[in-house]
Image (tube, helix red, strand yellow):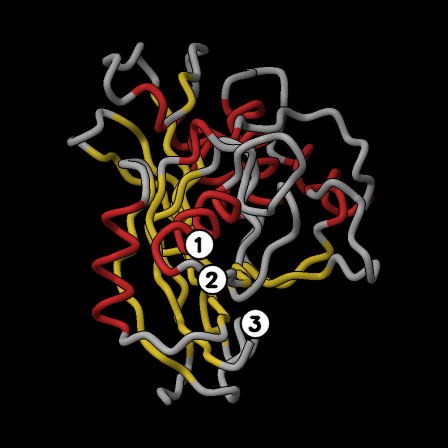
Amino acid sequence: MKNRYRLVLAYDGTSYHGWQEQKDVPTITQVLRKSFTSVFNQDARLFGVSRTDAGVHARGQVAVLQTNILVTPKKMHFALNNALPDDIVIRSIEKIDRSFHLHANIETKLYYYYFFSHRPKPFVQRYGWYFHKSFNLEKLKKSLHIFVGTHDFRSFSTGDERDGDTVRTIKSIDLSYCKKLGAHRITVSGPKFLHHMVRRIVGACLDVASRDEMLIFCLKKALDERDSKQTLLNAPAKGLVLHKVEYSKTKKA
């Protein structure tokens, strides 16, 4: 498949079993490939920069589409968006050469995690975790700050990394309030993340911030123990959004 295109996509992950194609369940990749085939009567291969889990959303997923046919990016953009369901939108398409690699030259992946401290309105509830316990906002901020920097994040992963490397760098973690959604937003940035890493960090910090008897030191201790079986909360997928992927350089064909 000689022709390569870089896609930037947004999707509501509620109805999908993640990005990666799976047997007998709907996934983002499966729907994209099916739509491409229906429009162009040709197959395509798709590779995503992040294999988002079931229920995780995206505003800036980056993918490479490979196909044997040559189509202008403008025509492909228009045709695919007309064929895709309403919960998947292609934001941009550009033709690329073989020098572009999805996982090379990534400067930052930016994730948002949304959670509600009050019961959300029905039309936004699918985009955040309703955390029904009261919590200490300052304690939450201090808890999140523990994870900034380079650490071994094995305790905040699934423990199933293929190469066993669980050292990652978090550039920043910020907490703000999104008035439009009525939700708190945790923004996490870094070049590379482990499976479930952001969700486990968010869940653990909210767990500690909502319990007077738990000290912030518990998080540092869990981090140092490097045990993926630690029992602090794992935040649900519905609050996580892949917001943006920034590359240091890209080349067009």
Residue 116 screen position, x and y as percent:
34, 21
Residue picked out by circle 2:
42
Which residue is at the front of the view, 160 or 115? 160
Which residue is at the front of the view, 7 or 111? 7
Disc 1: CA contacts within 10 A as few (<14), some (14-19) or many (>=20): some
The quadrant the N terminus occupies is bottom right
The quadrant the C terminus occupies is bottom left
**Residue 103 — which label?**
3
Quadrant position of residue 183: top left
Which of the marked residues, 3 or 2, is nearer the chain's N terminus?
Answer: 2
Q: Amino acid at mark 1?
A: Thr
Contact check, label 2 and label 1, Cβ < 8 Å? yes
For the image, the number of numbered tags is 3
Marks 3, 2: nearer the viewer? 2
Up/down of 104 relative to 57, above or below: below
Furthest-front residue in this view:
41
SS for dot 3: loop
Residue in the picture at 56% in, 33% down: 17
Q: CA distance from mark 2 to mark 1?
A: 5 Å
**Residue 144 — which label?**
none
Q: CA distance from mark 3 to mark 2?
A: 26 Å
Furthest-left residue in this view:
180
Judged left or right of residue 22, residue 32 is left
Up/down of 59 relative to 1, above or below: above
Residue in the picture at 43% in, 35% down: 13
Residue picked out by circle 1:
37
